[in-house]
Image (cartoon, grey):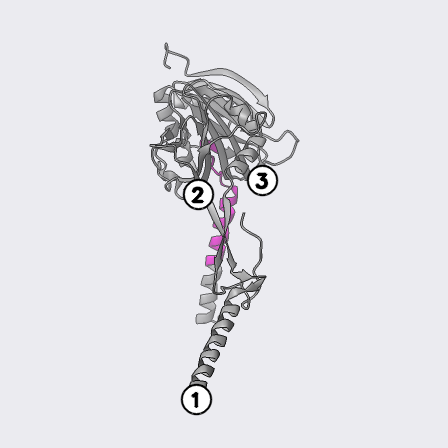
Amino acid sequence: MRGRGPGGTRCGRVLSVLLVLAALQLGSLVAPAYACGCGAMVPSERSRIAVGRETSVVHWDGRTEQIVMRLTVHGDAREAAWIMPVPHRASVELGEAALFDELAKITAPVWETRHHFWPRDGDWPFGERDGAGAPAPGAAAAPVGVVDRRRLGPFDVARLTATDPDALRTWLEGNGFALPGPLEAALRPYVDQGWEYVAVRLAPEEAGAVLTGALDPLRLRFASDRPVYPMRLSRLARTAQSLGLYVIAEHRMEPSGAIGGREPEVTFAGRLERTVPDGAVAGLVGDGPAFLTAFDQSFPDPSRIDGDHELRAAAADTPYRTVRHRDELLAVGGVPAWPLSVLAVLLLAVAVALRAVRRRRAR
């Protein structure tokens, strides 16, 4: 029997590595994906789902908090479950998708043009540039109490109370809400604080359809003497998380900390102008004073999330707007200015040289 040479051994090792990588990748496709910036989500068995982006609106008037959230999901799951803790009993209804369109328009970056003199990559003569721009506790209660359960669009929504995280998990599993294994320990801080829960089972209204794209927004309303955005359960996520948060209150607001993610980045701050009195934003805010602050935050390692976003008033209502720049080559009458300037300098140099020659001849 002929032995394998060095080349054959190397090929065998490479093939083994590729097979291992392929197996790992396949395993990632069927493993549950825990995601959602303010809760935990898991699909049905042997399917996958990922929340590519979560965008939420928090409105607080000093007594009542409203959260409107919209998830954009991808995968092949036909149903998934999600749970969100809330500090007090919440009402739940479908939100308006137009709310997010209006807020995106209000907070859109301002584009300014900057001119540069010398050509850069993409400017003439180095090639043509593509002009497109980047755009409260009471008496002892049952371990689990069901406030109500109903269907809202693609959502099966149950409002729950719980004094025991294990009992809460048992109820969820027995009622079609399959949730991640580590959930019991993650829920313990909320149970200890007497919070309540909104459990959501997402299932497309069309039989056989998968959950994909932007889901209908959900709107939660509950009493709150301080604004909070629940985030603790996101530590169960297996992939990096991204959160876009609009906060509407009387003053400019800010998170009290990064809670294990990167520092939140303010993308907009300004007082809302009531230019569209019948729009979705006006319907959410009402007649009270409204200052809008928008944040973006990423969580590269969700396991480091160590709390909820507690929001507080900033030191001042300083307005801010993101400014993006469009760089253009300085031109005069449609002609780049730099060759004209170079030509002018050359002509001047020639004129000076000729003058010097005439002077020497005159002498």
Q: Earlier in the sequence, mark 1 or mark 2?
A: 2
Which percent across, then down, holds residue 238? Answer: 44, 41
Inspect the image, locate mark 1, and give the three-letter code of the amino acid beneath it.
Answer: Ala
Residue located 47% across and 83% down the image: 354
Looking at the rendered structure, which numbered label has been put on residue 76? 3
Inspect the image, locate mark 2, and give the three-letter code of the amino acid beneath it.
Answer: Ala
Front residue (pair 236, 172): 236
Q: Nearer the viewer, mark 1 or mark 2?
A: 1
Q: Which residue matches tag 2?
A: 240
Front residue (pair 138, 22): 138
Please report contact status of discs 1 and 2: CB closer than 8 Å, yes or no: no
Local crowd at mark 1 within 10 Å, few (<14), some, or many (≥20)?
few
Please report contact status of discs 2 and 3: CB closer than 8 Å, yes or no: no
Q: Which residue matches tag 1?
A: 362
Front residue (pair 317, 266): 317
Q: Which residues are magenta?
A: 17-41
Which percent across, then down, holds residue 196? Answer: 43, 20
User: Is residue 245 placed above or below 282 in the rendered structure?
Assistant: below
User: Is residue 80 placed above or below 23 in the rendered structure?
Assistant: above
